[in-house]
Amino acid sequence: MATRLAHRFDVAVKGLTPGYFALVMASGIVSVGLSLEGFELLSRVLLGVCVAAFLVLGGLTILRFLRFRHAMAEDFLDPKRAFGYFTYVAGTNVLGVRLFMEGYHTITAVFLALTALAWAVLGYVVPWTAVLGQVARPVVANANGTWFIWVVASQSVAVAAATLEPVSATTTQGLSVLAVVAWSVGVFLYAAAGMIVALRMLLYELRPEDLNPPYWVAMGACAITVLAGARIVEMAASPMVDATRGLVAGLSVMFWAFATWLIPVLFAVGLWRHWLHRVPLQYEATLWSMVFPLGMYAVAGIYLGQADELPLVGWIGRVELWLAFGVLLIVLLAMLRHVLVTVFLSPRAAKTSRGG
């Protein structure tokens, strides 16, 4: 039995999707929203989930690198999976921002230093290995919603830099430059990813199975662009911030409007996929890529409502926060059941639990 359990564990580690840090992103951002609204107990419970997920996934990723390096190399070469590695950048920054709210400013600063470096390195490595370095053409045929995670990673760096600025008087200029540059890069990347993914949808067959949860990241990327913009607007005066404050504020409102427009579209796609075409609705790691955008939209609305004095936007964000919380609980329970069945139960017990 121990041997079979070890084998199932190895299979799970080898097949660990690069985008699993979306679990950290999702639990962390909903925790941020609950804290902003004063629900400290619920927020800290989710903070515990976020920290546990970060540590477990970090350990599993290191183990995967040590034991199944070839599998990680294959991920970097796959345009459908490689951009998932940016979830490490975004998840670490979301956790850092939440820990900042608890007073752990040094940890947030360390996380930002690590993720800014990872963002810069992955920003050149992943597009080359997964896209530009591919011999097979056209690569656009493999574009999907995970490409928007690059945008999310960029904006997470901007959010973390803007968050640290009030308590880092000696580095205000550097943080303001980093925040504005990361935000600007994220905006251009959104336009690029949007065009490429739109071309894939228009030029190639689009099956119901292809419209998977990562397409929700298109909305989440808009939402975190809003949040980053709102945080930049609130930053202290500096040449970089002063030169862009009005532009950032205006574009943030536009991104919020587009994110709002996308939500009914994405829900309609889900109904078309699961109800009309009967694609089974079951747990998969990419579901966390749906939970995060819902939570980020809520937090972005709350912050934008405060920064730009838009009470309606803030109210919508507060209401939507509970939708994100409910979806998170459902996906979390489904994940725990999935891990129990696929890793810890015997094959016969697993088959019984699935109704086989």
Image (cartoon, grey):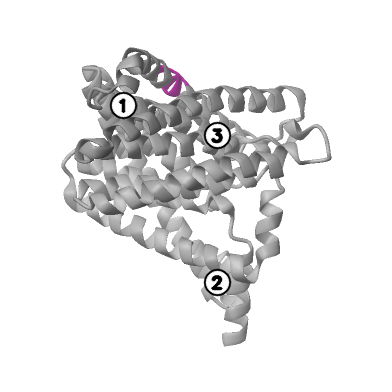
What's the magenta bit mostly, secondary-structure-wise?
helix
Upstream in the sequence, badge 1 or badge 2? 1
Upstream in the sequence, badge 2 or badge 3? 3
Name the side, left or right, on which 186 lies relative to 210: left
Q: Nearer the viewer, residue 134 or 310?
A: 134
Query: Label 3: which residue?
Result: 148
Q: Quadrant of residue 308?
A: top left
Image coordinates of residue 249 in percent, x first then y, are 33, 17
Secondary structure at badge 1 equals: helix
Q: Which residue range is magenta in the image?
A: 257-261
Cα separation, mark 1 vs mark 3, equals 21 Å
Name the kind of residue labelled 1 in the image: Ile
Image coordinates of residue 311 in percent, x first then y, are 21, 19
Whether 314 is drawn above or below 165: the answer is above
Upstream in the sequence, badge 1 or badge 3? 3
Nearer the observer: mark 1 or 2; the answer is 1
Query: Label 2: which residue?
Result: 343
Q: Residue furthest front?
A: 170
